[in-house]
């Protein structure tokens, strides 16, 4: 499966991939994230149920604390 993540092409050896599984593969589990899939925000409650398709475009942003 070919995906574009934050503007960079990435390949994954999977026919089906959920947003939740992608988060695991990218070793981002447990981090505060905002994920946009093809210009639409994916609510965290939908990560497990949102399936990715070949050539999808994702933007993944992590929250940074500070003050």
Image (cartoon, helix red, strand yellow):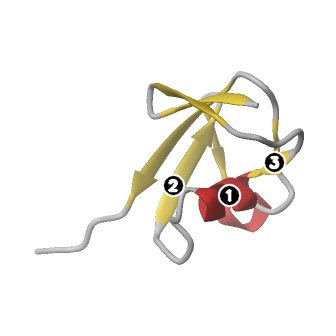
Q: Mark 1 or mark 2: which comes first in sequence?
A: 2
> Label 1 crowding class (10 Å Cα cut-off): few <14, some 14-19, many 20+?
few
Q: Distance from label 2 to label 3 (Cα)?
A: 18 Å
Q: Mark on residue 43? A: 1
Q: Which element type, helix, strand or loop, lies under badge 1?
A: loop
Residue 47 in the image: state x and y as whole percent.
Answer: 74, 59
The residue that appears at 49% across and 61% down in the rendered structure is 33
The residue located at (72%, 53%) in the rendering is: 19
Q: Earlier in the sequence, mark 2 or mark 3?
A: 3
Give above or below for 49 relative to 4: below
Q: Are marks 1 and 2 in contact (CB under 8 Å)?
A: no
**Residue labelled with disc 2:** 34
For disc 3, the marked residue is 17
Please state which of residues 41 and 26 is positioned toward the viewer in this rendering. 26
Q: Quadrant of residue 4?
A: top right
Q: Identify the image quadrant of the N terminus.
A: top right
Does the CB distance between marks 1 and 3 fall below 8 Å? no
Residue 18 lies, in percent from the top left, at 79, 52
Callout 2 crowding tier (Cα within 10 Å): few <14, some 14–19, many ≥20 = some
Residue at image point 36% right, 64% down? 63
Q: Is residue 55 above or below residue 52?
A: above
In the displayed structure image, the side of residue 66 where residue 10 appears, left or right: right
Relative height, residue 10 to residue 19 (above, below): above
């Amino acid at each position: 499966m070919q995906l574009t993540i934050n503007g960079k092409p990435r390949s994954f050896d999977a026919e089906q991939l959920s947003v939740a599984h992608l988060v695991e593969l990218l070793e981002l589990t447990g981090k505060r994230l905002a994920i946009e899939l093809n210009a639409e925000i994916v609510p965290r409650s939908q990560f497990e149920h949102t399936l990715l398709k070949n050539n999808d475009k994702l933007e993944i942003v992590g929250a940074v604390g500070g003050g």
